[in-house]
Amino acid sequence: MLLSVLSGLVVSVDAFFIGLSLGLQKKAKFLYLIIINAVLFVLCMLGFLIAAQLYERIAFDTDLVVGLSFIALGAWSLLHYFIKKRSKKEHFSLRTIALVGLVMSAEAMLITMGITFIFLPSSTLLIPVAVALAHFGYSAVSFYLARTRHMKRIPVVLSHVISGLALIAYGLMAIFVEIGV
């Protein structure tokens, strides 16, 4: 059980970089982050319940699917940043903040489902709670750090690369669990 909660904490570290990118935007307010994380909590609980129901009906081991999903999510995160960077659109609206929140919430739901699949049948409600609280904690801390003058020195590309690589590493770990390495 401890490993499943730790997995939720580790994989949720990408929320640090989402909070950082929101904190660097002048239009973003901390209230937006609270609303995003409330939606995220609901989706994490929903993801846990869906995963628990699906697990009984799936005839194959889900670790490989979860691993490949995390790898794809990490690769998408990396590619999305570099493609977006080329378009050079810097317009950051409230609609963009809402979209970032929905993507972060959906990703957290998928993370919760993946961790639940990996550790079933011993998964508990601590998994979605840990994922949601970790997302909130990481994003809140980084949001406030982004408002300091010292954070302006950190290249933005570093946050996106670390976030994507963290998801890819977790996907590889899930695949290695399946293979037995």
Image: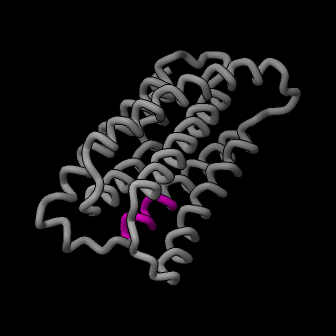
Q: Give residue 154's quadrant in the image.
A: bottom left
Is residue 181 visible to the viewer in this orientation of the structure?
A: no
| Magenta region | 158-164
Q: Is residue 23 left or right of residue 122?
A: left
Residue extending furthest right? Answer: 59
Is residue 43 shown left or right of residue 19?
A: right
Report whether 14 appears left or right of 55: left
Q: Nearer the viewer, residue 34 or 127?
A: 34
**In which quarter of the view is residue 71 placed?**
bottom right
Q: Magenta residues: mostly which secondary structure?
A: helix
Instruction: Identify whether 12 is placed above or below 122.
Output: below
Question: How many marks on residues?
Answer: 0
The answer to which quarter of the image holds residue 161 is: bottom left
Magenta-span inclusion, residue 64: no
Residue appearing at x 54%, y 53% in the figure: 167
Q: What percent of the width, then of the height, locates residue 17?
A: 36, 56
Give x and y (percent) for residue 70. Answer: 62, 50
Percent across and percent down for residue 176 are 66, 46
- For the residue pair 42 and 156, the one nearer the viewer reads as 42
Residue at the far front in the pictured view: 94
- Left/right placement of residue 113 relative to residue 92 reads right
Q: Nearer the viewer, residue 177 or 109?
A: 109
Q: Quadrant of the C terminus?
A: top right
Question: Who's the residue at 50% across and 70% down the image?
Answer: 81
* Residue 137 visible to the viewer: yes
Work out whether 133 lies above or below 110. above
Identify which residue is drawn at 51% across, 28% down: 4
The residue drawn where x is 57% and y is 39% is: 111
Q: Residue 69 appears at what percent x and percent y?
A: 68, 49
